[in-house]
Image (cartoon, rainbow, N blue to C red):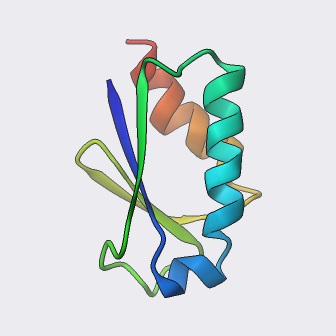
Amino acid sequence: MVNVSVCLGSSCHVRGAKDIVAMLQKAIADNGLENDVELSGSICLGKCSSGGVNMKVNDEIVTGITRESFPQFFTEKILRQAKQ
């Protein structure tokens, strides 16, 4: 199980957290990972100075996720771990 927590605090919110959550939900469904990925939200991950949305994937905090960087992030950090 891959645990993914998306920061929904004010800084990440204005940087597109809502769009990133929608992209995550779609990518999880498109890849049939509904039973392999647990998606949740958090208020703050303490990395507010990054240039995008922050997430915690299992025990790793990943900073600066944007719409453009999302596909690579999803493949490297979620898809690979879910397929293990």
Residue 73 quadrant: top right
Looking at the image, residue 71 sits to the left or right of residue 60; the answer is right
Closest to the observer: 17 or 67?
17
Q: Can you tell which quarter of the image residue 14 is in?
A: bottom right
The vertical placement of 61 against 40, above or below, is below
Q: Residue at x 30, y 79 (%)?
A: 46
Determine if residue 31 is in view: yes
26 over 12 or under it: above or below: above
Residue 65, placed above or below residue 52: above
State the image coordinates of residue 84 (x, y, percent, origin top left). 37, 12
Q: Residue 66, can we see it? A: no
The residue at 52%/35% (across/down) is 76
Quarter placement of the N terminus:
top left
Taking the image as shown, residue 71 lies to the left or right of residue 8, namely right
Labels in figure, total: 0
Q: How far across and how far down the image is residue 43, in percent? A: 36, 74
Residue 54: where, in percent of width, then height?
46, 66
* Residue at left offset 63%, top offset 39%: 25
Q: Quadrant of residue 67?
A: bottom right
Residue that lies at the very extreme toward the left in this rendered image? 59
